[in-house]
Image: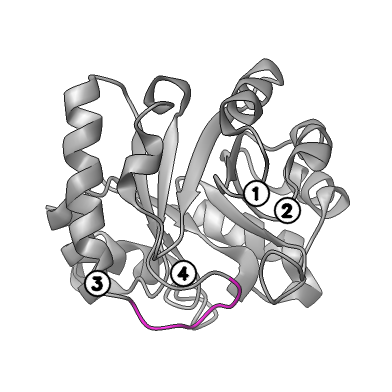
Amino acid sequence: MTENVLISPSILSADFACLGAEVAAIDQAGADMIHIDVMDGHYVPNLTIGPAVVKALKPHSKKPFDVHLMISPADPLIEAFANAGSDLITVHPDAGPHLHRTLQSLRNLGCKAGIALNPATHADVIDYVIDDIDLILVMSVNPGFGGQSFITSQLRKIETLRRKIDNSGNDIILEVDGGVNPITARDCILAGASALVAGSAVFKGAGTYQQNISALRGIPASQVA
């Protein structure tokens, strides 16, 4: 049931001492996208990478760069991240004064546009911009740090969002990020998710990235080449 789900490994859990090699490794291991968590130490209590790092990593993979901006305000930096090679940029609806304008700007810059919903953010926030988005990211942990446990209440939100997407008739990726492992991955897919972000579940052992990605898709290790 989960074989066709898109897997977007989060490099937040990668070895930062050899980040280019890590990106290349997950590309070869079967990742569909490369998930990049951008944190500003203000909107979330952590500080990670900026546009210069995205640009430096771009030559290491031909897969789409799935960039999640956990920054506020987001508008002043979206052009820099677009120019750095981001293919899809996701923003939080409360990270700027005019969400619709931000989404328009992303598309005008040649990027696909995403909205991220924190655990306490209501699904209805997408209703009046559903024709302007390419991805909805459900945060199944509170954003800021990797390695947290999955918040099961978000499964109901995934189900609600799946209905909204289907009713809209739009081709929108429904992605889940936080505490995703082979067990919670199946729950997310059953609820309607079409893409999964996973950090520690992918990067938990050198040389096992292909098996780890396949496990998220529900493919037994015995069937992995």
Location of mark 1 (residue)? 95
Cα gap from disc 4 to disc 1, whole angstroms: 33 Å
Please indicate whether residue 81 sits to the left or right of residue 142 in the image. Answer: right
Location of mark 3 (residue)? 184
Q: Nearer the viewer, mark 3 or mark 1?
A: 1
Label 3 crowd (10 A; few <14 / some 14-19 / many >=20)? some
Q: Pointers 4 and 1 in contact (CB under 8 A)? A: no
The residue stretch that appears in magenta = 144-150
Residue 213 on image: x %, y %: 37, 63
Disc sitting over residue 209 in the figure:
4
The amino acid beneath tag 1 is Ala
Ranked by sequence position, the earlier of labels 3 and 2 is: 2
Cα gap from disc 2 to disc 1, whole angstroms: 5 Å
Can residue 25 be seen?
A: yes
Q: Secondary structure at mark 3?
A: helix
**Residue 147 included in the magenta stretch of the image:** yes
Ranked by sequence position, the earlier of labels 2 and 1 is: 2
Image colouring: one colour
Disc sitting over residue 72 in the figure:
2
Q: Residue furthest top?
A: 108
